[in-house]
Image (spheres, helix red, strand yellow):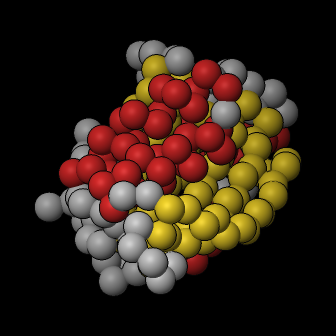
Amino acid sequence: MNPFAKTIAGLFSVIGPQSNTPLEAERICSALIQKLSDDPSRNLDPHTWQNAMQMVPSQVESATTSQTLNRTMAIGDLPGALASICANVVGGSHASALAKPIGSYLNKYGEPTAFNCLILDQTRTDQIHLYLTCLNVTGAGSPGSFSIASTLLSATLNLSNKQTQTTITKVFGSFGRPSDEPFYLRIFS
């Protein structure tokens, strides 16, 4: 069973080139998965995910955005809507590459009432962009009407800065690639 899926689901994704050695984004992702797995009673709590992401050192840009979206749709379309919200945060050509696999992942677990999605984008070798989207779904009264509360945390790591690179290697260098678990998705750029 996926320890990150109940009526709440969680997914980790890394975007980057193929590499013979683990990317820094993969190492960070492994560390965050381990950190969140340490306390099974809290591994799906959005605040725990937000705190874990904010502990990644040397963030040069960070932002938090919260909004509520009101949508009317069939219940079966909910996984696709949640996937689209998470994928569109990354934007560009990666949005379409992410939306389908995220939607497929969510379809396996029914219609989640909450979804945490952490995406690490290391398409460029000198930067890692981190995007954490925490979604909470509630019925809005009428059938097929949903309210989706969204909290987005985004950050950037500048790996061209030698001190940042040293810090990231020191903190995450002992971690390898995440294992091929059902809650991990790898997208090649």
Q: Is residue 85 left or right of residue 92?
A: left
The part of the image, by quadrant, that contains residue 43 is bottom left
Q: Residue furthest front?
A: 142
Would residue 72 be seen by someone viewing this image from the given angle? yes
**186 and 38: which one is in front?**
186
Q: Is residue 106 left or right of residue 30?
A: left
Residue in the picture at 74% in, 50% down: 155
Residue in the picture at 75% in, 42% down: 157
Quarter of the image with the N terminus in it: bottom left
**183 and 165: which one is in front?**
183
Q: Is residue 4 left or right of residue 24?
A: left
Task: Classify 20 as above or below 24.
Answer: above
Pinpoint residue 75: horizontal percent, then vertical percent.
34, 61
Task: Classify 132 as above or below 96.
Answer: below
The part of the image, by quadrant, that contains residue 93 is top right
User: In the rendered picture of this protein, how many numbered marks are placed on residues?
Assistant: 0
Q: Is residue 48 left or right of residue 44?
A: right
Pinpoint residue 161: horizontal percent, then vertical percent.
84, 33
Residue in the picture at 49% in, 70% down: 146
